[in-house]
Image (cartoon, rainbow, N blue to C red):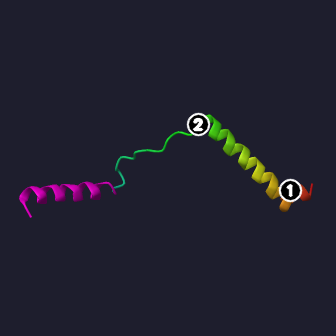
């Protein structure tokens, strides 16, 4: 192995090891959700909640 390749591989290993430390920088690479997508998710959640309550009502609704 040439000295340059050895140095490059050691540097890559060092960077990889340092990325697991608790103080490593956190990069948020997720895209922000659009307003429309947020509304669709809310609508889907409400619809699923209503369907779940029809199948198996929560105790608060049955002992009112």
Label 1 element class: helix
In the displayed structure, does residue 20 sit left or right of residue 35?
left
- Tell which circle, 1 or 2, labels the residue nearer the N-terminal end: 2
Query: Quadrant of the image for the N terminus?
Result: bottom left
> Residue 31 or 59: which is nearer the viewer?
31
Residue farthest along the bottom direction in this orientation? 1
In the displayed structure, does residue 3 sit left or right of residue 16?
left
In the image, is residue 8 part of the stretch drawn in magenta?
yes
Where residue 52 appears, as percent x and y from the top left, is 80, 58
Q: Residues within 10 Å of mark 1 (few under 14, many from 20)?
A: few
- Residue identified by numbered label 2: 34
> Residue 41 or 18: which is nearer the viewer?
41
Residue 11, image quadrant: bottom left
Residue farthest along the top direction in this orientation? 35
Residue 40, image quadrant: top right
Query: Quadrant of the image for the C terminus?
Result: bottom right
Where residue 63 appears, as percent x and y from the top left, is 92, 58
Q: Tag on residue 21?
A: none
- The CA distance from mark 1 to mark 2 is 35 Å
Residue at the spot 81% in from the left edge and 55% down from the top edge:
51
Label 2 element class: loop
Residue farthest along the right direction in this orientation? 64
Residue 57 in view (yes/no): no
**Relative height, residue 52 to residue 41 (above, below):** below
Residue at the spot 77% in from the left edge and 49% down from the top edge:
47
User: Is the stretch drawn in magenta largely helix, strand or loop?
Assistant: helix
Residue at the spot 86% in from the left edge and 57% down from the top edge:
54
Residue 10, image quadrant: bottom left
What's the magenta region? 1-20
Where residue 62 appears, as percent x and y from the top left, is 91, 58
User: Total label count?
Assistant: 2
Q: Tag on residue 60?
A: 1
């Amino acid at each position: 192995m040439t000295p340059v390749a050895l140095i490059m591989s050691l540097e890559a290993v060092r960077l990889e090891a340092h990325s697991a430390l608790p103080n490593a920088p956190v990069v948020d690479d997720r895209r922000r959700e659009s307003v429309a997508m947020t509304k669709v998710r809310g609508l889907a959640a409400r619809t699923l909640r209503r369907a779940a309550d029809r199948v198996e009502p929560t105790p608060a609704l049955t002992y009112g």
